[in-house]
Amino acid sequence: MGDIYSNCLCNIAATKSVDSDGGIFFERDPNLVKPVKLAIKWTGRDKRAVIIHGQGVYYIYLDGLWADHVESAPLNTRGWVIQERLLSPWIIHFGERLFWECNATAACEIAPTGKPYLGGYGYKGFCRDLRSALMQLSLGSFQPLEGQHEPKKMAYAKWWELIEKYSDCKLSKDDDILVAVSGIAKIMSQAIGDEYLAGLWRSRFLLDLLWSPHFPKGFIRPPELDRASPYRAPSWSWASIKGPIWPGNHQSISAADLGFSDTKVDVVELLQVIINAKGEDMTGQVTGGNFSVRCRTFYATWDQKETYNNNLEINVMDNVFKGVVYLDEKGTWERLVSSKDNSLLCMPIFLKCSRAGNTYMSCDGLVLEPTGLRKGDYVRIGLFGASCRAPTMVDFLAYTEVYNKRRKETVTLY
């Protein structure tokens, strides 16, 4: 399927249709395909207002045209379409207006050059940006100019924007969750020279673990999602959750460019990752998977009475980190609350020191639960983030050096 769309000349999309019977032609209001012309003239005596706001003829466009009529259109809420759209070099979107997109721009009848900007609030051009980054990597001739991001970093960041959108789409078959993006995964794996592991990337595997279910009400608990059933991915993969995923701030371009003001130190050692594919295609369905790390785990106490972000306190080598915990599924929340157990097993993945006004350390990682089958075997049940003050950067680096010398254990997550 990936080869079909990536080798087509132009993809014609019935973007407004809710199903295959909807067609591509719809009733159109001619007034909606041209901007509104507005002449502004100030009649007051305030000359300052004339200077600031200006007089003359202006053209008014609806804000968020692309977001409202393309990104949120019925066709683009279907999971398989994400891959088809990203792999196609040209796409014409049919609806009440005509829209089109390629690697260079996104445009429509009302703005055929792509200007003014069509996105509006909430728009993410992840398809075009990811497609462009992968093409640049495949050609191997891109030299980033000042202010531009290196295409490999762009590809990783836009991959997670794609997953954020894709995870909120509909699939007729739940077990297609990895299959429906396998074409993109193959092309990206070849372009960036990285190994795809059930939705994550080997070179950034530890960072990729720090996703969480997306909660549109501002992370108010309890969680509303559950793990997909039947099984479709390991508990540490975003593909195991049935519902929208939030990649986390760690996946942004700025996070990939940690500079002088931020120092990140990994505190786990990745030993191996094993993926059990259903067939020969390692980017498709999986029947199991696990990874093993050398790390230190800590028990944290949390306040179950809190309904907003759940207070968390974790003591890491005599430093008390305070933060929040995000449980992955509704069933876990209900079970832990009914058991009245206020302790959670946490596995820090990295420590970071930031100097934005005050120097502070942050600790991010996974919340684990034993499988009960074998000592050292766990599943993921959530994500945590916590922080505390650090006197200086030197103290932070000394702390992490001592931390990494402490005795570690081998932990395997399924």
Image (spheres, helix red, strand yellow):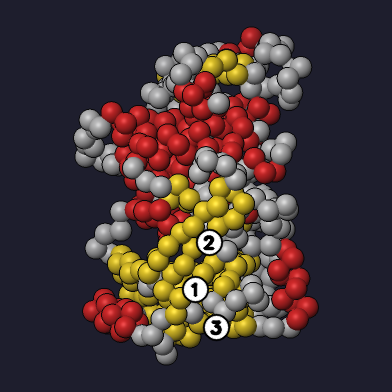
Three-letter code, disc 3: Tyr
In the image, taking residue 128 as reference, residue 21 lies left or right, namely: right
Which disc is residue 228 wearing?
none
Question: Which residue: 21% across, 39% down?
Answer: 146
Marks 1/3 in contact by CB < 8 Å: the verdict is no
Marks 2/3 in contact by CB < 8 Å: the verdict is no
Residue 325: percent from left, percent from top:
58, 70
Local SS, label 2: strand
Question: Which residue: 42% across, 31% down?
Answer: 131
Three-letter code, disc 1: Val
Residue 277: percent from left, percent from top:
56, 47
Q: What is the CA distance from the residue labelled 1 to the residue labelled 3?
A: 15 Å
Residue 395: percent from left, percent from top:
27, 82
Q: Quadrant of the C terminus?
A: bottom right
Which disc is residue 299 wearing?
3
Three-letter code, disc 2: Asn
**Mark 1 packing: few (<14 Cα in 10 Å), some, or many (20+)?**
many
Q: Which residue is mark 2?
A: 290
Choose between 255 and 59: the one closer to the eye.
255
Q: Which residue is mark 1?
A: 411
Sequence-wise, which precedes: disc 1 or disc 3?
3
Question: Which residue: 63% across, 36% down?
Answer: 79
In the image, taking residue 222 as reference, residue 86 lies left or right, namely: left
Local SS, label 1: strand
Q: Quadrant of the N terminus?
A: top right
Sequence-wise, which precedes: disc 2 or disc 1?
2
Local SS, label 3: strand
| Total numbered badges shown on the rendered structure | 3
Residue 86: percent from left, percent from top:
49, 29
